[in-house]
């Protein structure tokens, strides 16, 4: 707990004010407003521990158009890390959910890179907008190469002279990715020149640059780099990256990649080797055939390896058993394969994905499965289920036992992207105490409610002050919502950005 928040909560408790207190002991509205303003000030000003970034993410998740003036001020006067959230926040509340191309080149170079990278991941930049940004002066080289890489991956036209200039950059990351993109476009003579440059730097610098580039090659599916990767793999100076190179080959050239893996496995591979091979196959997904899993030679007692193989074969054969296989794998609680499965579900067919998300929620009703990790997965499951089948997510909220870990997990998931429907569903939940679930319910219902009772408004202000036992990312939402429902948002930006 931050010192200022600790003092704030202690002051509230010392005054006898807490959630669920008698209506005759209402906290003064002005005190709650000032408390909420302080929370928003912490979001607007850079904090030494970086906590302001989480608060800004919380405000972005509100998706509230009324935050436009706040984000615009932050974009103008904020630290570059805050500028990133401001630019993304403005895009997320814009009618077309797109980053304004005219904003990017005016940002600090570090902010440009983050806005472009995150904007592309969140689909807040269309190819047309990417082209507009590339046509502007003042764009940092890293932001430029990321935009060009996205366009090449999408088979869009790019300025090859622009790529050629970046291939001569002093930055090994930028010139490396530019060289790989040019190879993908048919200019195969560029990569040997980059290899020569790598040979002139120290081992640590070389390995770090290659490792970064391997991630980019996988991200943009640069299959033309396969030959160069074989060269890297055969160079003993790159032994530390051998596994990463093999994973990359398997993704961009599954046929030759399998041959590399089989040679590495040998006749009697260890369990660890087979696990690594299995994870590599899963990462490659449907690109590899079902037969690729045969070298795993799963023994009857190797439950995890067997589950991985069943998932992989189902994906490769486009079977309707993918969801069942994924559920079996997830229930083994293996951290690495679980993280892979959650990432895979983002691209899986919705009808299969929602079955798995629902299972992640439902299994928290079993006390023996209610680990911290599984609760976290249930939150993620509820958030994704709310995106693809909101009706099913709301049904589970309505059926969840009051104040249960399952109810809290669903509420946290729904709060990631609250809808008017989920807010209405929250308003029907019984709230008779001051528990964490009651706080989460109040925040959710406040997101789209046109009015709150005086008692609920006071409770919302107290949650903003730290008395609701919710994460800071939700306290800042409560602060904004309190001021908005209290009719105090008119001059909010002036009050937040004024001197302490």
Image: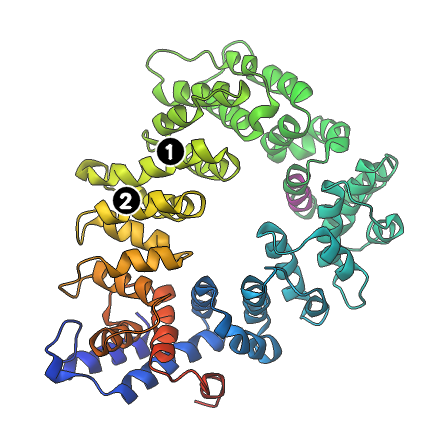
Q: Which residues are magenta?
A: 208-214
Q: Please tell me whether residue 254 belongs to the stretch shown in magenta.
A: no
What secondary structure is found at the residue carrying circle 1?
Answer: helix
Residue under pointer 1: 355
What secondary structure is found at the residue carrying circle 2?
Answer: helix
The residue closer to the viewer here, 410 or 96, is 96
Q: Quadrant of residue 214?
A: top right
Q: Residue at x 56, y 68 (%)?
A: 81
Q: Please tell me whether residue 211 belongs to the stretch shown in magenta.
A: yes
Q: Give the image location of residue 480, x and y in percent.
A: 39, 75
Label drawn at residue 396: 2
* Alpha carbon separation for disc pair 1 and 2: 13 Å
Q: Is residue 11 above or below residue 403?
A: below
Q: Quadrant of residue 326?
A: top left
For the stretch drawn in magenta, the main secondary structure is: helix
Q: Give the image location of residue 135, x and y in percent.
A: 82, 61
Q: Is residue 11 above or below residue 313?
A: below
Label drawn at residue 81: none
Left or right: 186 in relation to 50 = right
> The C terminus appears in which quarter of the rendering?
bottom left
Q: Give the image location of residue 32, x and y in percent.
A: 29, 83
Q: Give the image location of residue 160, x and y in percent.
A: 87, 48
The residue closer to the viewer here, 474 or 126, is 126
Instruction: For label 1, count other residues whose C-alpha is less than 10 Å away and answer few (under 14), some (14-19) or many (20+).
Output: some
The residue closer to the viewer here, 168 or 456, is 456
């Amino acid at each position: 707990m931050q010192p200022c928040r600790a003092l704030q909560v202690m002051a509230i408790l010392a005054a006898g004010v807490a959630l669920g207190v008698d209506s005759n002991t209402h906290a003064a509205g002005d005190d709650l407003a000032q408390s909420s303003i302080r929370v928003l000030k912490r979001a607007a000003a850079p904090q030494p521990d970086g906590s302001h970034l989480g608060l800004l993410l919380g405000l972005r998740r509100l998706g509230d158009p009324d935050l436009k003036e706040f984000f615009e001020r932050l974009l103008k006067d904020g630290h570059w890390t805050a500028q990133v959230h401001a630019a993304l926040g403005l895009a997320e509340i814009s009618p077309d959910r797109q980053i304004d191309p005219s904003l990017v080149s005016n940002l600090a170079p570090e902010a440009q890179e983050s806005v472009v990278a995150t904007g592309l991941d969140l689909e807040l930049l269309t190819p047309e907008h990417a082209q507009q940004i590339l046509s502007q002066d003042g764009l940092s080289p890293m932001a430029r190469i990321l935009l060009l890489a996205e366009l090449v991956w999408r088979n869009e036209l790019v300025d090859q002279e622009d790529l050629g200039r970046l291939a001569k950059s002093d930055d090994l990351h930028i010139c490396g990715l530019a060289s790989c993109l040019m190879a993908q476009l048919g200019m195969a003579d560029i990569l040997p020149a980059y290899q020569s440059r790598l040979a002139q730097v120290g081992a640590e610098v070389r390995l770090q640059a290659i490792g970064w580039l391997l991630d980019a090659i996988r991200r943009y599916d640069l299959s033309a780099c396969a030959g160069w990767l074989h060269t890297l793999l055969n160079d003993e100076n790159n032994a530390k990256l051998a596994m990463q190179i093999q994973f990359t080959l398997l993704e961009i050239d599954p046929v030759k990649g399998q041959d590399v893996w089989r040679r590495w496995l040998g006749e009697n591979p260890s369990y660890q080797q087979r696990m690594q091979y299995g994870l590599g196959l899963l990462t490659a997904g449907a690109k590899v055939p079902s037969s690729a899993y045969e070298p795993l030679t799963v023994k009857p007692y190797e439950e995890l390896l067997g589950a991985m193989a069943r998932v992989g074969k189902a994906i490769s054969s486009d079977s309707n058993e993918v969801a069942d296989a994924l559920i079996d794998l997830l229930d083994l609680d293996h951290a690495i394969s679980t993280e892979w499965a959650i990432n895979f579900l983002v691209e899986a067919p919705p009808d299969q994905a929602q079955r798995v998300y629902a299972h992640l929620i439902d299994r928290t009703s079993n006390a023996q499965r209610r680990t911290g990790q599984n609760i976290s997965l249930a939150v993620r499951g509820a958030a994704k289920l709310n995106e693809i089948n909101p009706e099913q997510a709301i049904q589970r909220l309505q059926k969840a036992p009051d104040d249960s870990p399952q109810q809290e997990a669903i509420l946290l998931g729904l709060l990631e992207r609250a809808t008017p429907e989920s807010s209405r569903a929250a308003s029907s939940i019984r709230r008779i105490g001051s528990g964490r679930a009651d706080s989460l319910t109040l925040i959710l219902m406040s997101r789209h409610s046109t009015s709150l009772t005086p008692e609920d408004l006071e409770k919302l202000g107290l949650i903003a002050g730290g008395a609701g036992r919710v994460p800071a990312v939700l306290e800042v939402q409560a602060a904004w919502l309190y001021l908005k429902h209290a009719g105090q948002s008119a001059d909010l930006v002036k009050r937040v950005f004024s001197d302490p």
